[in-house]
Amino acid sequence: MGKDDVISETVASYDITAEQYTEEWFDRGLDDHLARFAEMLPQGGCVLDVGGGHGRDSLALALMGFDMFLIDLSTRLMAAGRRRGVAVSMAQADLRFMPFRDACFDGLWACASLVHLPRADMAPALREMARVTAPGGVLFLSMRTGRGSGWECLQGGLRRFYTYCSGDEVIGCLTESGWDPLSWQEDPPHWFSVLSRRKEIP
Ligand SMILES: C[S@@+](CC[C@H](N)C(=O)[O-])C[C@H]1O[C@@H](n2cnc3c(N)ncnc32)[C@H](O)[C@@H]1O
């Protein structure tokens, strides 16, 4: 199976379960992480929600005054968010190849989306994310902890591909891909999150 097939099958699982997934997760906000991220941004700054799904976090950041744009490959998850009142700009796009000019965002919020990339795509995706972020801009990234990668099965024969990382690997990958990791934490039992700044371009 090719790496794009891995992403297509995973996104198809989100499309098929979009309503149920949104029902389960839409009200579970990440208030502490959102507050720390927001503190590092210019007031009213332009923020991209990378793989934002139904847009729960975009809605929270829009309510804090940020100018939000969300991309995701699952049109049905984005539609489910719209039905719940998420009224930010949205587009279907692959986070590995983003349809934005260089340095146009002050911040990127990437919550639990890069977890679905094959490991070989992680550093290129982080470089692509650095490309669209202004120097000094901020990235929130959350990843699944563990080793290796593989499929997690859902009901009905659906499945999602995950890549698991150690905290050291995430920090190393960010550092090599245009980011300065500033603070990070384990969110037990399965998550690791990092706030980074886009390195200045020499
Ligand atoms: C676990 S969900 C997280 C959604 C949202 N960020 C949240 O925290 O609720 C993973 C999301 O990543 C999206 N996704 C996976 N691979 C992607 C890719 N290559 N480009 C854009 N979105 C992707 C999926 O469609 C899904 O919406």
Image (cartoon, rainbow, N blue to C red):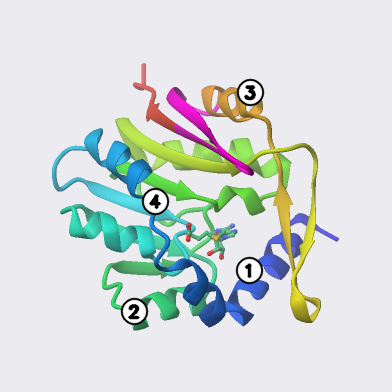
- The image quarter in which residue 119 lies: top right
Could you tell me if the residues under marks 1 and 2 are in contact, i.e. CB atoms within 8 Å? Answer: no
- Cα distance between the residues tagged 3 and 1: 28 Å
- Ligand 1 within 8 Å, label 1 CB: yes
Quick check: 40 left or right of 152?
left
Q: Which residue is mark 3?
A: 168
Number of the front mark, 4 or 1: 4
The residue stretch that appears in magenta:
177-194
- Ligand 1 within 8 Å, label 4 CB: yes
Amino acid of disc 3: Asp
Amino acid of disc 2: Arg
- Cα distance between the residues tagged 4 and 3: 23 Å
Q: Which residue is mark 1?
A: 11
Q: Which mark is residue 84?
A: 2
Quick check: 89 left or right of 11?
left
Q: Which is more N-terminal, label 3 or label 2?
A: 2
Q: Which residue is mark 4?
A: 30
Could you tell me if the residues under marks 3 and 1 are in contact, i.e. CB atoms within 8 Å? Answer: no
Residue 51 percent across, percent down from the top left: 49, 58
Residue shown at 73%/58% (left/top)?
161
Q: Which is more N-terminal, label 2 or label 1?
A: 1
Residue shown at 40%/47% (left/top)?
109
Number of the front mark, 3 or 1: 3
- Ligand 1 within 8 Å, label 2 CB: no
Say which of 86 and 146 sits in front: 146
Mark 4 closeness class: few <14, some 14–19, many ≥20 residues within 10 Å:
few
